[in-house]
Amino acid sequence: MSTSQRLTLQEDLTIYHALEQKRQLLDALAQADTLELDLSQVAEMDTAGLQLLILLKREAQKAGKQATIVAHSQAVRSVIDFCNLAAYLGDPLVIPAKEAH
């Protein structure tokens, strides 16, 4: 039976939270075959946060699991776009209607 879990991060994806978030992300991945990551509440993201997302994708692939980002905040979209990693992360960058104008 395939298990799915959705994890919503509300803290910034920065160096200041990286260690605890690494454990949180990898624990969530260990408990599910599919992990959906909601980053819509993340107000700030730096390269440490980006490294966590890359690590999560890599670990999911190695384990034959799937990790997807299902919601992106403006801060997350900006860093992913700036680093040109949208294709690598493989998740559509959904822009909420209220920000599209």
Image (cartoon, grey):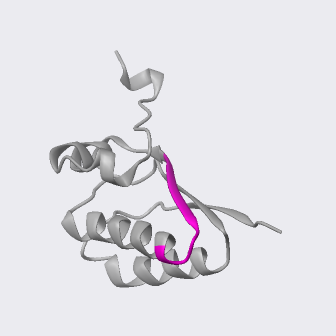
On the rendered structure, is 50 left or right of 66? left
- The quadrant of the rendering that contains the C terminus is top left
Q: In this view, does 30 lie above or below 40?
A: below
Query: In the image, is residue 11 part of the stretch drawn in magenta?
Result: no
Among all residues in the image, which is located at the extreme left? 82
Q: Residue most toward the right?
A: 1
Residue 59: x and y in percent read: 45, 76
Q: Which residue is drawn at 25% across and 50% down?
A: 85
Residue visible at 40% across and 71% down? Answer: 58
Q: In the rendering, at what x and y percent does residue 1 appear?
A: 83, 69
Question: Who's the residue at 36% across and 53% down the image?
Answer: 89
Query: Magenta stretch?
Result: 62-70
Side of 27 relative to 54 (left or right): right
87 or 101, nearer to the observer: 87
Q: Where is residue 38 in the image (x, y as percent from the top left)?
A: 52, 53
**Residue lying at 66% horizontally and 69% vertically, measured from the top left:** 33
Query: 43 and 71: which one is in front?
Result: 71
**Side (left or right) of 66 relative to 22:** right
Question: In the rendered picture of this protein, how many numbered marks are placed on residues?
Answer: 0
Residue 65 is covered by the magenta coloring: yes
Q: Is residue 7 above or below residue 96?
A: below
| Location of residue 16 by image quarter | bottom left
